[in-house]
Amino acid sequence: MNANLIYRTDGGGERRGGPGPGDVGRQRTGPAPASIGLWVFMGVVSSLFALFVTAYAMRMDSPDWHPVALPWQVWLSTALLAAGSAVMQAAARAARAGRLSLAHRALRWGGLAAAAFVGSQLWAWQALLAIHVAPANNPAGSFFFLLTAMHGLHVLGGLAGWVLAMRAAPGTRMALRIALCARYWHFLLAVWLVLLAALGWLTPEFVRFICGRG
C-alpha cells in the first residue's frame, strides 16, 4: 500500500481550494493518528487470537476431544472475505489515483462482501447445529463457535469503519479512510486463514510433536 495514503496534510487540514485529482496524498508531514491507532489495534487483536489458538491447541489433547468436520460454508466465507479484501485494495488504488467515484463504488462492494461473509458464517453455524454440533456438547465445536464468533465481531467492527468511509466527503479524508479499510480487510483475511488452518488441519498428534511430546 502506498505510504502517502497514511499521511495527513500540514496542520491536519486539506490544501486551500481542496485537492485535485492528483493531489490526494501530497504535502504530508507524518503518520495520521488513525493509521497508527489501527496498527496498534491490529497488534492487540493479533495477540488475542494467538492466545485463543494456543488455548485451542492445548485443549485438543484431551480425551473428550472429537474433531469437527468444517461445513462447506466456510469455503464460501473464505471466498467472500478474499473478494472483499481484493476489492478494498482496488478502492485504495483508485483513491490514490484520484478516481474517487470508482473508489467509492469499489468500497461499497467491499463492504457488501464483508456483510455477506457474516451471513455465510451464520449459515455455517446453522449447518453445524443441524447435525447436533453445539457449543456445549463438544470442546472442538465450542472452539469453532468461539473463534468464528470473535472473528465475526471484528468484521462487524470493520463494517462500522466502512460506514464512516462511505460517508466521508471526497478528498484526503476519504482516501485515508479507504486506505485504512483496505488494510483492515487484509488483516481480517489473514486472521481468518490462520483460524481456518487451525480448525481444519491442526491435530493432537501435530501439537504433541511441536511441543516435544510426540
Image (spheres, helix red, strand yellow):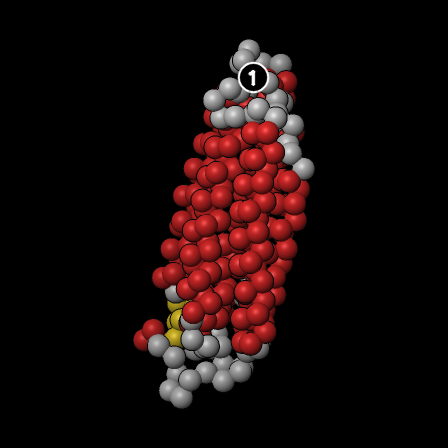
Q: How many marks?
A: 1
Q: Find residue 213 and report its image quarter.
A: top right
Q: Is residue 170 visible?
A: yes
Residue extending furthest toward the bottom = 17
Q: Is residue 207 left or right of residue 165?
A: right
42 versus 150 height, above or below: below
Secondary element under disc 1, as helix, strand or loop, is: loop
Residue drawn at 49 percent across, 65 percent down: 178
Q: Residue furthest top?
A: 63
On the image, the x and y values in percent for residue 137 come to 51, 19
Pick the quarter of the image with the N terminus.
bottom right
Quick one: label 1, few (<14), some, or many (20+) residues within 10 Å?
some
Relative vertical location of residue 101 with respect to residue 211 in this rendering, above or below:
below
In percent of width and height, residue 18 lies at: 42, 84
Task: Tell me which amino acid carries mark 1.
Answer: Trp
Residue 28: give x, y in percent of width and height: 42, 73
Give the answer, above or below, for where 107 lies relative to 203. below
| Mark 1 lies on residue | 65
Q: Residue at x 40, y 49 (%)?
A: 41
**Position of 71 relative to 99 (above/below):** above
Tell me the quarter of the image containing the C terminus: top right
Identity of the residue drawn at 55% across and 35% down: 125
Residue 209 at least partly seen: no
Left or right: residue 78 versus residue 115 is right
Q: Nearer the viewer, residue 127 or 61?
A: 127
Give 135 or 34, whichever is nearer the viewer. 135
**Image quadrant where residue 132 sits:** top right
Q: Looking at the image, which residue sits at the far left?
A: 11
